[in-house]
């Protein structure tokens, strides 16, 4: 066999062997235990910090609001959709029953027009719904700019929640 | 308001119409644009080299070595945009040591390995083996050791051994051409096979990618050949450049027609996605598609190179134009990748809305990072040209004859 071919075969064999050795050394220890991935990744995901607590946790303390909401159009909406993630609030707010909650534990209060408009602003891409259609599964649309912007008697600016109870709109 | 809610509101203000939540932010950014761009340069440069070797276009000889080394230096970097996009530098090597066959993305590992180890390195090795042995005898110290090691400590440069080198090199090149097609066809396939995305999902995608790759690779080698000749202060081989320009013209023409066919097909079919794509093309992609890719990157080079096929202006004018045209073509092909990768993510798969894309100067997916991965292969190329200068190769035919 010619010299250069012999050397090439040796070189290829060396690199393939090196790859196999490196693979054994560098491969994550839990790789392949459950499939073609690092099994430890599952535990790492379980251990990652939670941000959302879920409606069941909210209703433990805010039962009255929960009951209000349960019979309105927003019954199927999770609290945290409007109020933001509340895991920290759920975990630690109980320690502050007798005093003011620190800012870091306060949840977002959506009181402005723009908050409601996130879902209710008229949008050509959303399914059209007329006001006389009563269907809980559809989101009603208004134009947040023109839908009763001011109180006609007092001329004061109006927010959506001045007329609609957000928990039972 | 909590920071992440504020961020969400800010992001929502960049959205038009209806988009699904996972479409608001573009996950594939400029680094994913670079990946098909760089891989295309490799395939294109290699195909130019094979023209000389397989089809015996002797006039291209001055660019043969440059084309091979260009292909190698860009090949070495081709995976880096992907790996840095993943953003886990300490785990990135794991994708190299856990290959598998069940994902289209993971197949790239095999395609890459085949092309780098079996095709490109072998071809260069057989091509340079004799020269490395000769250069090792002439050099001292580290350089001598480097040549020895690179030639795997072989010593046989008898005419019989050289003839064998040439024969195997030729066979490797013959295998290399379909491999280069496979390499870049594969990159097109990655996009073309995504059924859910009407901007990507077309069987023409691998072919379009391939032809634009050949165009970009040839343009890059042309540019590098001119720059290297200027640096070395040697006269440009105009016959060679004219020939490259001719190939560039015809392949660019085919590429242009293929992309046109793809669009005509799309327009005539006018599937339910047509309206959203129509607005995308004339809205958010107008500048990158019509101005950068179409006008600057395709029409201007086509007209210029087309005129050259009938009328050749003076050498000095041609020299300047041969410097400008490849740059335009490279910009055009870069924006072709941009329009595919970024464009495919700008519209909602509900076909009812658009998101927008912003890119920063710094950061892991910014312009500077992208520029870095474009500069690194040029530095590798500079090193390779210093270590294995194609112009210092001794012509074995003349030596064998003189011996």
Image (spheres, helix red, strand yellow):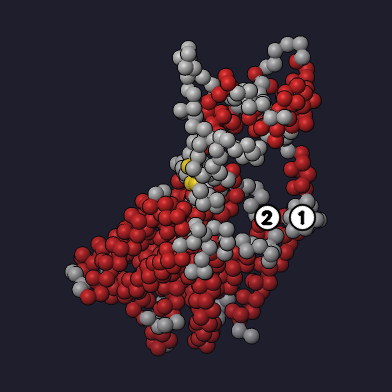
On residue B94, which mark appears? Answer: 2
How many labels sit on residues? 2
On screen, residue B143 above or below A127 = below
Q: Are marks 2 and 1 in contact (CB under 8 Å)?
A: yes
Q: In which quarter of the image is the N terminus of chain A?
A: bottom right
Tell me the chain of label 2: B
Q: Say which mark, if any, is on residue A31.
A: 1
Query: Tag 1, which secondary structure?
Result: loop
Whether marks 2 and 1 lie on the same chain:
no
Quarter of image, res A79: top right
- Residue sitting at 40 percent across and 88 percent down? B401
Neighbour class for label 1 at 10 Å: few (<14), some, many (≥20)? Answer: some
Q: Which of B151 and B180 is in front in this view?
A: B180
Q: Which sits in the foreground, B178 or B239?
A: B178
Can residue B284 be seen at all in this image of the molecule?
yes
Q: Which dot marks residue A144? A: none
Under circle 2, the secondary element is: helix
């Amino acid at each position: 066999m010619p010299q250069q071919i012999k050397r090439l075969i040796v070189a290829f064999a060396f690199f393939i062997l090196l790859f196999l050795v490196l693979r054994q050394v560098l491969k994550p220890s839990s790789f392949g235990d459950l499939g073609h991935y690092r099994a430890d990744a599952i535990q790492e995901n379980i251990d990652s910090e939670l941000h959302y607590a879920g409606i069941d946790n909210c209703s433990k303390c805010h039962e009255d609001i929960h009951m209000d909401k349960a019979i309105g159009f927003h019954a199927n909406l999770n609290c945290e959709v409007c109020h933001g993630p509340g895991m920290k609030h759920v975990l630690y707010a109980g320690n502050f029953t007798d005093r003011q909650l620190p800012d870091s534990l306060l949840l977002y209060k959506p009181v402005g027009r723009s908050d409601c408009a996130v879902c209710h602003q008229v949008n050509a891409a959303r399914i059209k719904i007329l006001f006389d259609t009563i269907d809980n599964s559809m989101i009603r649309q208004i134009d947040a700019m023109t839908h009763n912007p001011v109180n006609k008697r007092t001329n004061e600016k109006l927010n959506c929640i001045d007329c609609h109870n957000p928990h039972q709109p | 308001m909590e920071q992440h809610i504020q961020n969400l509101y800010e992001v929502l203000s960049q959205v038009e119409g209806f988009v699904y939540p996972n479409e608001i932010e573009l996950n594939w950014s400029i680094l994913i644009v670079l990946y098909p761009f760089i891989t295309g340069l490799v395939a294109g440069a290699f195909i130019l080299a094979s023209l000389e070797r397989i089809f015996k276009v002797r006039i291209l000889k001055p660019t043969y070595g440059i084309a091979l080394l260009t292909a190698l230096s860009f090949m070495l970097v081709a995976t880096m945009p992907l790996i840095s996009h993943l953003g886990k530098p300490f785990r990135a090597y794991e994708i190299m040591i856990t290959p598998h066959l069940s994902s289209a993305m993971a197949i790239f590992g095999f395609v890459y390995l085949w092309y780098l180890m079996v095709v490109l390195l072998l071809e260069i090795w057989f091509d340079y083996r004799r020269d490395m042995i000769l250069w090792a005898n002439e050099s001292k110290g580290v350089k001598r050791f480097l040549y020895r090691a690179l030639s795997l400590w072989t010593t046989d440069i008898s005419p019989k051994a050289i003839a064998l080198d040439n024969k195997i090199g030729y066979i490797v090149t013959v295998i290399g051409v379909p491999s280069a097609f496979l390499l870049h066809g594969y990159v097109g396939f990655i996009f073309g096979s995504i059924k859910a995305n009407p901007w990507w999902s077309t069987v023409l995608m691998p072919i379009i990618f391939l032809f634009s790759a050949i165009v970009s690779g040839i343009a890059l080698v042309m540019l590098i050949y001119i720059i290297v000749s200027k640096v070395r202060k040697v006269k440009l081989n105009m016959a060679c450049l004219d020939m490259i320009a001719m190939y560039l013209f015809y392949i660019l023409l085919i590429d242009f027609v293929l992309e046109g066919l793809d669009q005509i097909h799309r327009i005539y079919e006018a599937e339910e996605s047509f309206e959203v794509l129509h607005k995308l093309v004339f809205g958010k992609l107008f500048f990158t598609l019509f101005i950068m890719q179409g006008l600057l990157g395709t029409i201007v080079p086509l007209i210029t190179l087309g005129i050259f096929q009938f009328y050749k202006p003076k050498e000095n004018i041609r020299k300047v134009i041969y410097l400008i045209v490849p740059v335009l073509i490279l910009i055009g092909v870069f924006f072709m990748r941009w329009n595919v990768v970024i464009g495919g993510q700008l519209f909602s798969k509900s076909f009812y809305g658009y998101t927008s894309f912003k890119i920063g100067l710094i950061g892991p997916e910014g312009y500077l990072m992208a520029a870095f991965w474009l500069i690194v292969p040029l530095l590798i190329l500079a090193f390779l040209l210093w270590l294995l200068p194609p112009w210092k190769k001794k012509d074995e035919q003349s030596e064998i004859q003189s011996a």
